[in-house]
Image: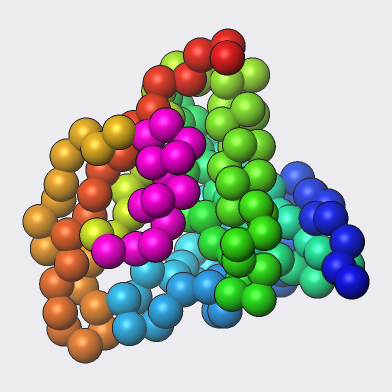
């Protein structure tokens, strides 16, 4: 029996766990995963926050956000396939929004590939579609995919 997830906010110190989840969670055909150097490079910027989930010490998921003034963007959210449908993605999203709210963020943004199953998670979390970027993602197969821009206002709810 697996235990409840534990969470770490150790930033770049959790990069090995993040990359393990990244490799498992993001389908390479869409080319959405970030490289190790991209992930490490983002930590040089102000307002970056990472929460990593572990189940029985195994990396299960992560959420990477960046806040600028009163807005934040969910840069990446990934949950390893073996840990999906257990509430880990929602817990990571809630942690990211709570952290943003505590740091004065009012609007929380994200973009997701059209057709991504995570759209249902974001909808249940109160995100609304704000726009579409046509042909934003180019998969490794050359196919183009739209990006759906979602936004949620954060309140003290």
Identify which residue, 45 or 131, lies in the foreground.
131
| Residue at image coords 18%, 67% | 145
Instruction: Judge whether residue 19 can be spotted in this image.
Output: no
| Residue at image coords 65%, 52% | 87
Q: Where 103 falls versus 33 (above or below)? A: above
**Magenta range:** 115-127
Tell me, yes or no, whether the highlighted magenta stretch contains residue 122.
Answer: yes
Left or right: residue 150 versus residue 64 is: left
- The image quadrant that residue 71 belongs to is top left
Identify which residue, 82 or 45, lies in the foreground.
82
Task: Name the spot of residue 46 as percent of width and height, x first.
Answer: 55, 35
Task: Name the spot of residue 124 as percent of width and height, x first.
Answer: 45, 40
* Furthest residue in direction left, as rendered: 134
Task: Name the spot of residue 153 as percent of width and height, x first.
Answer: 40, 21
- Number of numbered labels in the structure image: 0
Left or right: residue 59 versus residue 41 is: right
Instruction: Judge whether residue 72 can be spotted in this image.
Output: yes
| Residue at image coords 79%, 49% | 7
Considering the image in quadrants, where does the C terminus appear? Answer: top right
- The image quadrant that residue 93 belongs to is top right
Q: Where 43 falls versus 85 (above or below)? A: above
Q: Where 90 falls versus 24 (above or below)? A: above
| Residue at image coords 24%, 37% | 129
The structure's colour scheme is rainbow
* Furthest residue in direction bottom, as rendered: 141
- The image quadrant that residue 84 belongs to is bottom right
Left or right: residue 60 versus residue 131 is: right
Left or right: residue 40 versus residue 15 is: left
* Furthest residue in direction top, as rendered: 156
Tell me, yes or no, whether the highlighted magenta stretch contains residue 40.
Answer: no
Considering the image in quadrants, where does the N terminus appear? Answer: bottom right
């Amino acid at each position: 029996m697996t235990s409840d997830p534990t969470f770490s906010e150790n930033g770049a110190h959790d990069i090995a766990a993040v990359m393990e989840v990244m490799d498992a969670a993001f389908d390479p055909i869409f080319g959405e995963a970030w490289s190790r150097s991209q992930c490490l490079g983002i930590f040089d910027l102000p307002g970056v926050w990472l929460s990593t989930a572990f189940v029985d010490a195994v990396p299960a998921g992560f959420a990477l956000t960046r806040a600028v003034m009163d807005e934040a963007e969910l840069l990446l959210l990934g949950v390893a396939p073996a840990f999906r449908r257990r509430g880990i993605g929602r817990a990571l999203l809630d942690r990211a929004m709570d952290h943003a709210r505590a740091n004065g963020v009012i609007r929380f943004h994200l973009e997701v590939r059209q057709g991504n199953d995570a759209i249902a998670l974001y909808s249940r979390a109160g995100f609304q579609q704000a726009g579409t970027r046509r042909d934003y993602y180019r998969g490794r197969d050359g196919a183009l995919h739209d990006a759906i821009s979602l936004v949620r206002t954060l309140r003290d709810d």
